[in-house]
Image (cartoon, grey):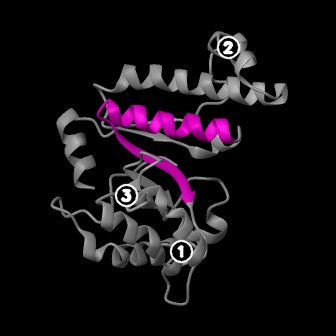
Amino acid sequence: MDRLIEAIESKQNPSVVGLDPTEALVPAQIVSDFADEIAEQVEDPAEAPAAQLSVAFFEFNRAVIDAVADIVPAVKPQIAMYEALGPAGIDAYTMTCEYAKQQGLYVLGDVKRGDIGSTAAAYAPHLGGVAEQGTVFDPWHEDAVTVNPYLGTDGITPFVDAATATDKDIFVLVRTSNPSSSELQELELASGERVYEHVADLVEGWGAETIGRERHVQPPPVAD
């Protein structure tokens, strides 16, 4: 987390730019520009619409990154927008993350992973990379990811371990802004505290051994 805090201080700006493209948000001209090129490249014409949108998403993101790289410290691509397009969308996501890092930005992958221990361990290479023949390859190019803690410690530990090993970060959801979050997060426990307050205590414990130079367990707030 030190790198993000230092970047915020350097640019005197705590803003994080979301990169959450949709077909409705990306200008139609950008999408249409790649129609002929994609039609020539895909083997199955049924794949063309997703491939065309994926290329358009990346080009749109690249323009946004170029516009903000000198102003903000970080970007936050939401992986769901890309996964919806299948393999081509995942390529657009990883290319976006890689390009943002090349421009000196901190990349927060908004993946919100949260599952049982074995599945969480399979997701952890978002931070830890993929080992291939004795070397580690990082296909995701993320500096941090968001995770959902509501399956408990075993769903978080693989991410903590991966982040510690690679000097990367995790952002743990505690209290979210979606309208129905209070159905669970605001429930009062027998101790009198709210569920989200108990989760915050757990987060503090999970991060107790990884406090950085800036003495932050919890990062600056990021919109969900």
Residue 218 in the image, given as x and y percentages of width and height = 33, 62
Element carrying mark 3:
strand
> What's the magenta region?
87-112
Q: Which residue is the extreme one toward the front? A: 133
The residue type indicated by label 3 comes to: Thr
Residue 92 is left or right of residue 75, and the answer is: right
Instruction: Please name which of the two marks, 3 or 1, marks the residue nearer to the observer.
Output: 3
Q: Secondary structure at mark 2?
A: helix
User: Percent from the top left, x then y, of residue 73?
Assistant: 30, 37
Percent coordinates x, y for residue 196 in the rendering = 50, 71
Report which residue position mark 3 lands on.
Answer: 135
State how far apart marks 3 and 1 are (Cα): 26 Å
For mark 2, does the 10 Å Cα neighbourhood hold few (<14), some (14 to 19), or many (20 or more) residues? Answer: few
Residue at (52, 71) in percent of width and height: 121
Residue drawn 29% across and 27% down?
A: 71
Q: Is residue 223 left or right of residue 29?
A: left
Q: Which residue is mark 1?
A: 155
Structural crowding at the residue carrying mark 3, measured as other residues with C-alpha within 10 Å and reported as few (<14), some (14–19) or many (≥20):
few
Mark before the other along the chain sequence, 1 or 2: 2
Residue drawn at point x = 62 percent, y = 61 percent: 181
Disc 1: CA contacts within 10 A as few (<14), some (14-19) or many (>=20) = many
Q: Between disc 2 and disc 3, whose residue precedes?
A: 2
Q: What residue is drawn where x is 48% and y is 34%?
A: 96
> Which comes sooner in the sequence, label 3 or label 1?
3
- Give the residue at the far left of this rendering: 213
Task: Provide the residue designation for mark 2.
Answer: 37
Whether residue 100 is in magenta: the answer is yes
Disc 2 residue type (three-letter): Glu
